[in-house]
Image: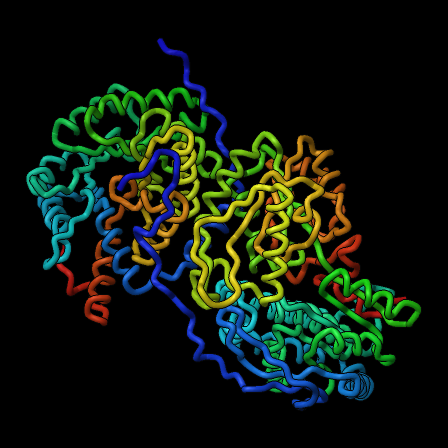
Amino acid sequence: MTAEYVPPRVERVDQVGVEARAAAFTKRSIKKESKEQALRLVLSMMDLTTLEGMDTPGRVRELCRKARRPLVDEDLAVAAVCVYPPLVPSARVELAGSGVHIAAVATYFPSGQATLAERLDEVRRTVDAGADEIDMVIRRGDFLAGAYGKVFDEVAATKEACGPAHLKVILETGELVTYDNVRLASRIAIDAGADFIKTSTGKVQPAATLPVTLVMLEEIRDTFRRSGKVIGMKPAGGIRTSKQALAYLVMVKETLGDHWLHPDRFRFGASALLDDVLLQLLKLREGRYQSVRDLPLG
Amino acid sequence: MATTPRTLLFGDLWSYAPAPESKDILRLKPRYGHYIDGSFVEEGQVFTSSNPATEEVIAEVFAADEALIDRAVKAARRAYEKVWSVMPPSHRARYLYRIARLLQEHARELAVLESVDGGKPIKESRDVDVPLAAAHFFYYAGWADKLPYAFPGQAPRPLGVAGQIIPWNFPLLMLAWKIAPALAAGNTVVLKSAETTPLSAFRFAEILEEAGLPAGVVNIVSGAGATGAAIVRHPDVDKVAFTGSTAVGKAIQREIAGSRKRLTLELGGKGANIVFDDAPMEQAIEGVIAGIYFNQGHVCCAGSRLFLQESIHDDFVARLRDRVATLRVGDPLDKNTDIGAINSRQQLEKIRALVQSGVDEGATLYQPACTLPPKGYFHAPTFFTGVAPSHRIAQEEIFGPVLSILTFRTPEEAVERANRTPYGLSAGVWTDKGSRLLYMAQRLQAGVVWGNSFNRFDPTSPFGGVKESGFGREGGRQGLLPYLEVS
């Protein structure tokens, strides 16, 4: 039995200040070639997601085809397709050889309300089924009760259960409420072995916001400064427009530097964002906006 | 892409394309005469106003001499007696509201003009200078017909003719700070714009015409020190309001000593930004950036001395270095520019000389790798570590993007060090502990103490200095008082 994990002190966060800083990133003007480059980057960083009770193998296959090649005439793919564990096999068939990762939301997403054994078992089964990225969710109840050691242990155990798969730890920041909590939860997840930290399940409002993401990026930055360890970031939920996504890229660039502008280190969890990015790319190419009806369904 | 561990890479893997705000919206005349008694008077010695980012001449203006100032003061006196002081206060409010709305309508043009004439980034003229100027007129419009409620039982009455002299760092905003409360209180105005940034004041004069403000209520003249001196000396000026350097402020004070003239001065500063070890660190970094690099550091209340608790010094400086590396210096009209052009060659030379003194006296200089435009007056964002309180860069107002970093060990020591300056305009305190914030605010000798923020302005909040940073307040209910007689 190892000693219980005691989280170290993390930097305090001033709400007014962090929100003002986040708002400043939206003031950057991204035009022309830098916009086009950014849109392609956003596309390559996307975890194209469907997490609905209505999801069927057929629907997931459609999504995967669009993920592999969203622009008919260009060899450009999204980073990953993100689905519930039972749909991993369908995605696996469709994405074989494409380089598009398969992410699955394991650990009894989105509530996380199951025993540790059950949650770990689901992770192992999902990895065995072919997922190479696992999006887990921490138990907010444990965190809010101050049982930080328990949160740490569960993330660490999940990381172990992941084996070779990458682990993204969802903090569900909408339920942590304060920025101080977000900062602390980020630190615990990173200490416990997260490869990525992620804002939200998308099932709780508010989901990803710029200031919450900024707080998490700052913890990632402190980790890097302290140890050289590179942790990835994934805002998820509520990012629907290219304009929003560009503000996130600006924030990443000016907080962590250009090294983080890479799908290995930054992802967008989104479903509606893809179509808007495609519309914007087509507009830059053809000088006029298309209707979303002109885009193929995915 | 390779990166050495622990060094953040602020490269240009993805760079922002130029995003210049268009100058097409400007409708500048080749020359601007003084605005006296409702018409533009092209008299006096000609001088030019140029764009500090390109060194190109934008327009010609004229230096007003004593005779012109006399005409302006007489016009203001006439308008005071015949029109403005006898007008129902609610009608005065109507004019002020109209001016405020017109400032908003012309916001984009005014923002471009401020950036072209003064070198400030369009981001700031667009989001700070112009909206705040309009907000000041809206705010004081509200007071115009409620003065008895602002000073109950004190029978507030206007003073007469106010002579106002504004600096070059926030031309339109300082004009608003001066003119709005003066008019709301029922006074008329003779205002001198700054020598290097006269144009927005004349564009403002055109807006006054559009608003139908009666002739002579506001008179605007341009010129240098001699013009200002003529306003200060004029026997029929009832009140002098000056924003600028401490040296000139002292000269004004001497000049009008013993006269009936009322005086408010808003002078220099050497603001202390004090960061404790429990501060919200990332936001404190932002506060330091806003404190010293806002408007190229051409801010009288700039947080130009940074006091760090010794235990966090190294960590904080490392963070600051990363943050400064992301600042974008260049074309003021580019929407992504964070630091624009230094206002004038003269100012640039002064900044360079003080930076050199810092190096000579043994402080350690840091400037990020950034390429400055080949033309125009630009200065890289700069900070010094290892600064001793006796260094010139720790004592003199630099008025540029140059920060001096010092340390302290205890709250008492922070107070003592921060107060050890002739100035007393602003201070900032960064701590998570509310009780400490109050402790510091009570002891810091400064007109403004910001808690976990810096360089935040609002028309409802009084602003001004203590000690050699001046006296009198601008903004808020308190900002009316310098323009009123109360019993």
Residue at x 39% of width, y 30% of height = A140
Q: Quadrant of residue A119?
A: top left
Task: Examine the rendering and report whether any part of residue B107 can be seen.
Answer: no
Please tell me whether residue B403 is drawn above or below residue B312 in the rendered image. Answer: below
**Which quadrant: the C terminus of chain B?**
bottom right
**Which quadrant: the N terminus of chain B?**
top left
> Residue A256: image x %, image y %?
38, 43
In this view, the residue in front, A221 or B83, is A221
> Residue B357: image x %, image y %?
64, 49
In this view, the residue in front, A84 or B320, is B320
Q: Quadrant of residue B300?
A: bottom right
Task: Examine the rendering and report whether any part of residue B13 can be seen.
Answer: yes
A200 relative position to A68: left or right: right
Please tell me whether residue B376 is drawn above or below residue B384 in the rendered image. Answer: below
B209 relative position to A73: left or right: right
Please tell me whether residue A31 is drawn above or below residue A230 in the rendered image. Answer: below
In this view, the residue in front, A130 or A119, is A130
Residue at the top extreme of this rendering: A1
A142 relative position to B318: left or right: left
